[in-house]
Image: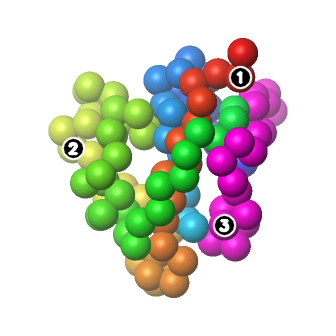
Amino acid sequence: MKLHSTPFEMIKSGKKTFELRLYDEKRQKIKVGDEIIFTNTVNGETLNRAVKDIHKFESFCELYKSLPLLKCGYTVDNVDSASPLDMEKYYSIDEQKTFGVVGIELCSDNG
């Protein structure tokens, strides 16, 4: 999975342990115990993380009410303004209605 530098570094450091995605055909193939290779889109660096759990929801609105946002890529500086609308820049409402969404819970490291 490709990530911008900030979320990539947050996963690398263990601060971000949930990756939020559309639950499309590609994500539906992911199972607990699988290993995901994340690639930093800026410098090409990669890291592997094992899947600890898969949390499926009908919408990001539902997901945002259920998962710990500080583990989803938000920080204490911006968590108060976190909104499911933030995900609309990546996935349209129609896509969310068609596929649902997923919070892929990652092991904080693979060591």
On-image quarter of the C terminus: top right
Which three-letter amino acid code belongs to the residue tagged 1?
Asn
Which three-letter amino acid code belongs to the residue tagged 2?
Ser
The residue lying toward the viewer, choosing from 91 and 18, is 18
Q: Residue 101's x, y, as percent?
A: 48, 65
Q: Residue drawn at (75%, 28%), measured in percent from left and top?
A: 47
Q: Residue drawn at (21%, 44%), measured in percent from left and top?
A: 81
**Residue matched to label 3:** 28
**Secondary element type, mark 3:** helix
The answer to whether 18 is drawn above or below residue 92 in the figure is: above
On the rendered structure, is 1 left or right of 80?
A: right
The answer to whether 99 is drawn above or below residue 63 in the figure is: below
The answer to whether one can see residue 43 in this image is no
Estimate how packed mark 2 is, as few (under 14), some (14 to 19) or many (20 or more) residues with alpha carbons within 10 Å: few
> Bounds of the magenta span?
24-48
Which three-letter amino acid code belongs to the residue tagged 3?
Gln
**Residue matched to label 2:** 81
